[in-house]
Image (cartoon, helix red, strand yellow):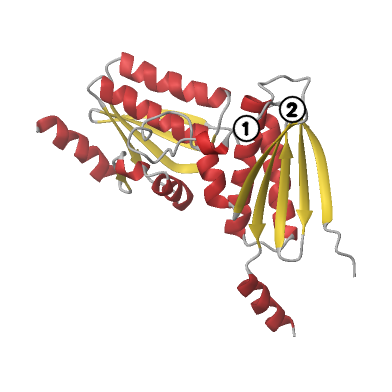
Amino acid sequence: MSMKAKTRHVDSVTVVDLSGRITLGEDLSELREMIRNLLGQGQKQILLNLGDVTYIDSSGIGELVSGFTAASNQGGQLKLLNLTKRVHDLLQITKLLTVFEVYDDESTAIASFQKAARA
Amino acid sequence: MSCEPESIEVTLESTLKSAETAEELTTKVCSQAGLDEEAQHQVGMAVHESLMNAVRHGNKHDTSKHVWLRFQLYPDRLEIHIRDQGSGFDLRRVPDPREAENLLKVSGRGIFLIRSFVDEFRVYNRQGQGTEVILVKRKNLRNKLEKRGKAS
């Protein structure tokens, strides 16, 4: 199953619900484009919901890092929500859990952006 | 008793789609080899990453070139050979993606994931004949003994 991405807004946060496989190819370019467009439109608080992601490869992981860096460079934040065990394990062995803020509850994740904005 | 391993070989096109095809085939072979679901996923991912490397870095997306994938089933292990038509690479020069200076790099995690998911990973640069990588996954002997115990 190829990757699908849907965006929705909760308070000031853009939640991107991703599903399917995040692997090298056209889908990955679309994800990159989507994140760049959101940042370009001033939507700088991005929460990627990976709950329905069935597979991610090294290129997919690289794209998450790319999105994180692009958001940070523009004064924004990109965080992750609902990691499956396999995605969690991949981020753990690659030490990327030390980079990303990861949540398993959407309201807590949304609140973390508000807290950061107030600070 | 023959010592020859059971062997399956396929020739794949140099396209990204081949990685998916190889991964599906790997899962089936791993299942046949008696590897559990997690091991099937891990070996499938190692093959996916190897194929991606062969297509992108080895054959450089040249669709006139091919990638050869061979599975060899031994009683104690599964060996997977993947050969491309590229000029090869030096494993010692592949940086560790977990180092602080590499952590935010977009690429460079493929080889690390392959090494994490198989028991042995070897690279042979064959002069004029491309590069061959060999992935070895050992069978979990404890599970095998448990299954044998249940069957008896």
Query: Is there any visible trace of residue A32 in the rendered image?
Result: yes
Residue A110 sits in which quadrant?
top left
Q: Nearer the viewer, residue B97 or B127?
A: B127
Q: Residue furthest bottom?
A: B152
Label number found at residue B52: 1
Compared to B73, does B59 lie above or below?
A: above
- Which residue corresponds to mark 2? B85
Compared to B78, does A34 lie above or below?
A: above
Taking the image as shown, residue A87 lies to the left or right of residue A108, namely right
Query: Is there any visible trace of residue A57 in the rendered image?
Result: no
Residue B102 sits in which quadrant?
top left
Q: Nearer the viewer, residue B54 or A47?
A: B54
Residue B29 x, y percent position in the rendering: 74, 53
Taking the image as shown, residue A80 lies to the left or right of residue A21, namely left
**Element at badge 2?**
loop
Q: Residue furthest front?
A: B127
In percent of the image, x 85 and y 64: which residue is there? B3
**On-image quarter of the C terminus of chain B:** bottom right
In percent of the image, x 25 and y 25: which residue is there? A76
Residue A68 x, y percent position in the rendering: 33, 29
Q: Amino acid at mark 1?
A: Met
**On-image quarter of the N terminus of chain B:** bottom right
Mark 1 belongs to which subunit? Answer: B
